[in-house]
Amino acid sequence: MTENSKRSRGIRPFQVMAILAEAQALQAAGRDIIHLEVGEPDFPTPEPMTEAAVTALRAGRTHYTPALGLPALRERIAAYYQQRFGVTISPERVVLTTGASGALMLLSALSLNPGDGLMLADPGYPCNRHFAQLFDAHGQMIPCGPEVDYQLTADVVARHWQPSTKAVLVASPANPTGTVLSPQQLAGIADVCRERGGEFWVDEIYQGINFGPEPELQPHTVLAVADDAFVLNSFSKFFGMTGWRLGWMVVPQDKVSTLDTLAQNLYLAPPTPAQHAAMAAFTPEVMAILEERRQILEERRNYLLQALPELGFKVAVPPAGALYIYADASHFTNDSLSFCARLLRETGVAITPGVDFGDYRSGEHVRFAFTTDIHRLQEAVERLRRWLSAV
């Protein structure tokens, strides 16, 4: 039997998927499991978007689209940037992809050469560094604690820049921490990247799931302060289309042609039904539905921010966006994977170990996803209270 490639052997498994698989097995055996582990909104896709897809399917619109996506959808996304953020971009710069993961795959293939470094915050979404590794580059992981909101800053990027550094990738709002970079912070990082001849990539897939009244925490885009940045976004989180697998990028105009060629070769075209569903995403009706859901998520977040510290977890930086609370569990454990596994088996509450998100103090942290209704969150907290008092 032949060996798998070195690059595939070097990619670490996503531990939350093992937690999810065990949780589903326990559920199938009759256990009542409360799922706070996977970052997927519990709301269905808004009905007008589903109906748009059904209408397109019944009309026979099931064939390939252009590799860069439906021109009409690219135009609607460009219009969305103008209407919501006051940013003017050409529709030609919008590239539809098979989810944000497809966008990151294309961008990695476009920009990274063997040996290049992609600078990332630790903790952060684990798959980002793995995409770099697939192209024989590497994730340049920078420990980022609560003193910098678990985010790279202009100063941190400047101090850690290496000759091999090709690009910096930040997420705002971020997974697992929910922290947000202000426009001024984004502009500062963009300046450092520009001065050093590197690229600035910004993951905005949780854009729209923002909390708090402060202007700098409201939904915004790096394109308002750095038109040369590369933006990765998705219809999965805010728009509720996780299973449809549709994302997009906004890129500099001179990169579009090469991305078109890469998309043709790597996956041919984004999913056609998903694109037709997304054509209805920016209507006033759908945006009103999404705002109602954002308010529900904020209510859940606020509940956990009050409840978790009472149990003994520390939340050094309250999340200003996304779907998660990244909690310091050092009062209970320095082995977050074993802690989460035992918690699941003994209480039926599934959460994510910090080891999924990097190495920096990861054994002392866990992630709670507030992706279930408030009554289930209350039940989860009560189970945790009983369990923690006994361990």
Image (cartoon, grey):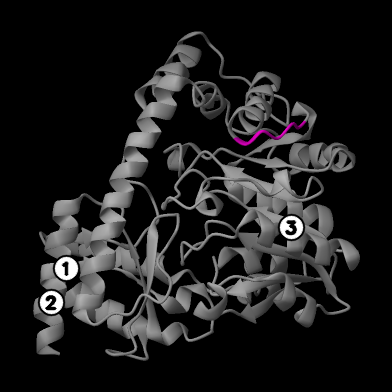
To which residue does mark 3 refer? 187
Answer whether residue 44 is visible to the viewer in this image.
no
Answer whether residue 154 is visible to the viewer in this image.
yes
Answer with mark 3 or mark 1, whichever residue precedes in sequence. 3
Is 55 on the left-hand or right-hand side of 333?
right
Q: Which mark is residue 269?
A: none
**The one of 6 and 273 positioned closer to us in this rendering:** 273
Q: Secondary structure at mark 1?
A: helix
Magenta stretch: includes residue 315 = no
Q: Is residue 210 above or below residue 388?
A: above
**CA separation, marks 3 and 2?**
43 Å
**The one of 135 and 193 positioned closer to us in this rendering:** 193
The amino acid at mark 1 is Val
**CA separation, marks 3 and 1?**
40 Å
Is 386 on the left-hand or right-hand side of 112?
left
Q: Quadrant of the C terminus?
A: bottom left
Q: Where are the magenta residues, as a range?
A: 85-89
Q: Which mark is residue 385?
A: 2
Residue occupying image coordinates x 52% and y 27%: 278
**CA separation, marks 2 and 1?**
6 Å
